[in-house]
Image (tube, rainbow, N blue to C red):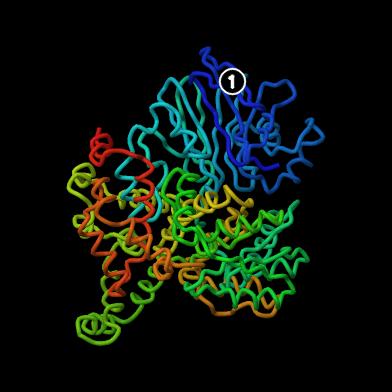
Amino acid sequence: MSVRSFVALAGWPEPAPAAGSWTGVDAGGRPLWLAHEAPGGRTPAAIATNEDRTVRAVLAGALYNRRELRALLGGRHALAGHDDAEVVVHLYEERGVQCVRGLRGAFAFVLWDARLNRLLLARDHLGLVPLYFAADGRRLAAATRLPVLTALPGLATAWDATALVAFVTLGTVPPPATFHPAIRQLRPGELALWQNGRLRPQTYWQPIFPERRMARRDLAVLVRGQLREALRLRQAGAVTGLLLSGGLAPAALLALGVAEGRPPAHTYTVVVPGAGADADAAATLAVAAGIEHVAVAGDLDWEGAVDALVAALGAPVGGPEVVLLQRALAEVGRRGEVGLAGVGCEEIFGGTAAAVDADRVRRFRRLPGVAREMAALWARMPLPGRHALAALTAAERLAPVEAYARAVSAVGPAARETLYSAETLAVLGDAGPWDALTGLFADAVNAGATDAADAVYFVDLVLRLPGAAAFGAAAAAVGAALRLPFADHRLAQLIASIPGRARAGANDRQRLLRAAVGRLVPGVPANRPPARALSPSAAWRVAPLRTLLAETLTGAPLARQGVFRVDAVERLVREQLAGEADHGTLLWRLFVVTRWLERQARPASEPARQTGS
């Protein structure tokens, strides 16, 4: 059984208990309430407990190794139901807080130990399921959906301008921050203990880079074995449908499923008129594999879909492909299947934009000094290709954290002054979205990173991957469950154990994955770059989105919110619609932020004053 969300309240005024909830008393005599949220109006699941009812837990998501754990625990414990939280309860009895290390999946849970009068909060290794919390020394609230906490009195009286700027710049908000100063989130691979009014977080897992790395000749067999296991665990007990594009990642999942005798029941591709979706390539792959392909109509209510996603997540959402993911998962759920997707492949195999840029710099630095000097001269001449070369020679002089910030940022430091209003800049002060990157690069060094490729890999895992998974979870809130075979922490650790240069660029990533998959079925592309269902640049060529963009990012809504400079945003819109420049990614983030701010229904100056307090 998979329960999507839960809430835990300690020290709060007791709400009206729902069916299946549990109310107890903590050490200070304050109420403690654990409950599952019931998706789709169904009755919430009962709270998992041990035999003497001294340990209770709620869990969101799924444990993919539940069968192995049930077999391990079955001889010593009474396993009455099918809730994964029950497995956590009994594993905790045997291993204490270290039980988290034995779990494998996409999960978050809260566990109450009455004997020790403490709560244990934990988020999965890669942060695929969020866990938000608020603690003030007297009380604690935790939930896997941000709107659950923002509905509590006093927790959403302000939004955080620094977090908003981080989303616009990086496309995600680095943990532990959220859009609300009073609400935090656990980091990937982190647990926290709440006892005697104190919350003590600790890291239980992160990727490490060993001193001795694996040889390339050993990789194919090891990667294939780990991928096969990851896919098997996510298909267990479910009829699956694969979200398919013409790219390498979903094609690899299709090939592995067919080779292992566990193919998906159907493959799905959303077709958006005018967006140039690769449905034909996906259909060709499906036919070659002997799987029925479903082309999902993409005539979407974009405004309604974006607003529904923002409401489900309680924050701005990722790129336009999240809307397509929502539409595809609705079709998957209608057929009673669980969705599989290739999300996470770039981060796990090292093929992100930052990784590719770092690899280019590494290769450039290996050139003789004379060649680098000639390249610098060429970059200053009005010749073809000089802009890309100028960017490369400039990046060569940057520290790794600065190069990463440049690769992933939609807004640079200089552009910040022209994009945001004077009120927003006054609140921000010297704080910037790049500050969190410095800490993450320091964490990478502590994990054994010895070069830029290792550091970039670490940061992509702990920053980009949880953000992508959170957007996928929002899309799944109204459709089928979503599972991501590539987003597996054991696979990530395996890839971290090879030399950085073997996973640094897109070609290296493809060689790794291609060697692992082999020619299992005809039609798997050998040299195709990562595919996006709908890039932001392509999205603004879709007629309904062009109209929505022009209506949303205009003077009235922007002036009312007071966050952005109206003239600057309107100039970006004009240039995009006229084809004079490509601001696709930045405009999408501004678009969804504006939709989210509209939901806050606050006077334009109020957020700035409050977040500065």
Residue in the picture at 23% in, 36% down: 609
- Rendered view: 181 above or below 488: above
Res 372 quadrant in image: bottom left
Query: In the image, is 429 to the left or to the right of 287?
Result: left
State the residue in front, 167 or 563: 563
**Outermost residue, bottom direction?**
383
Q: Which residue is mark 1?
A: 116
Residue 497 visible in the picture: no
Residue 125 visible in the picture: yes
Residue in the picture at 47% in, 38% down: 147
Check disc 1 and report its element: helix, strand or loop. Answer: loop
Query: In the image, is 140 to the left or to the right of 124?
Result: left
Percent of width and height locating residue 376: 23, 80
**Outermost residue, top direction?**
29
Residue in the picture at 38% in, 60% down: 548
Q: How many marks?
A: 1
- Rendered view: 323 above or below 103: below
Res 270 quadrant in image: bottom right
Q: Look at the image and tell me in which quarter the C terminus lies.
A: top left
Q: Amino acid at mark 1?
A: Leu
Percent of width and height locating residue 587: 34, 61
- Rendered view: 11 above or below 531: above
* Mark 1: few/some/many CA within 10 Å (<14, 14-19, 20+): few
